[in-house]
Image: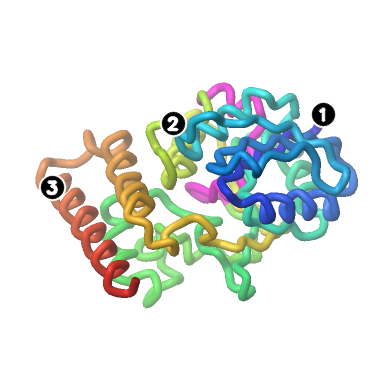
Amino acid sequence: MDLSIVIVNHNTKKLTEQTIDSVIQSTRTLQYEIIVVDNSNNPQERYQSVAGQPVILIPNVENKGFGHACNLGSKQAIGEAVLFLNSDTILHEGALDRSVAYLRDHKEVGALGIRTLLADGTLDHGCKRGFPTPANALYYYLGMDRRHPESKKYGAYRQTFVDEHTTSEVDAVSGSFLLIPREVLQAVGGFDEEFFMYGEDLDLCYRIKKKGYRVVYYADAQMTHLKGQSGLHTKSKEVIYHFYNAMILFYKKHYIRQYNILITCMVYCGVWLKYLLTVLKSKISG
């Protein structure tokens, strides 16, 4: 088996079916399996196949987050590589064929993401990112990357200096399309389930790079990401909390021993102030 595709469905049955259909319609040469981990609240979301394609369905009794669901799916995987694919994505022609071929030809690559477009055709910048060091995060929130997109210093978080049409090594790619050789995934132990949602893809890419593998933004394959179907746009206080808490978790896990207490206090205060402002804004606009 060339590829195992793991999709987490959380109350997005129609979108999930659309994503699976795009896999079927765009893939020509690969042998693959589709594994859907169902985190849905509604038992009516259950299904066994889409467009004639058998689906391995894993009903998840308790929703313990995106990373936990991905780990459940990957434990069932038998493919040479494992793809974690969001349920709100539409693959373009040949995306999987070319991506798997690239991964096979470059054994040093431990994770691969592809050029990802939003519904309006603009780039989803999450598909190529740097790690959120205190400096990278500061320059991003100050908008320095927008004023100096060519700068490797100021554009480090969104990797704005990396041309979207050029395949490049980056720090991290998005969990909306995260292709990993199965042996690499097993070597790093899968997703850290302490991240409920958000940040788990950054953490996984960080650990893959620590193992000595490259993380690659692959520009010769693309998809559309119908972003925000269950994310921050919902204005859910719980979702907003998980978004900002992921920043704290990542800092505590990977950076806290590298910085003094003053920097740590500034990071914590900055993150939670941003959280409170976001919650307040969502209440006002809601």
Q: Is residue 40 magenta?
A: no
Residue at 34% in and 50% down: 238
Q: Which residue is mark 2?
A: 192
Camera-side residue of 69 and 160: 69
**SS class, disc 3:** helix
Residue at x-position 51% and y-position 61%: 228
The part of the chain drawn in magenta is 169-188
* The image quarter in which residue 2 lies: top right
Q: Secondary structure at mark 1?
A: loop
Left or right, 104 with reference to 202: right
Position of 62 relative to 85 (above/below): above
Q: Amino acid at mark 1?
A: Met
Which amino acid type is marked by label 3? Cys
66 vs 27, left or right, is left
Q: For mark 1, does the 10 Å Cα neighbourhood hold few (<14), some (14 to 19), or many (20 or more) residues?
A: few
Q: Quadrant of residue 30?
A: top right
In the picture of the structure, the residue carrying the numbered disc 1 is: 1
Residue that badge 3 annotates: 265
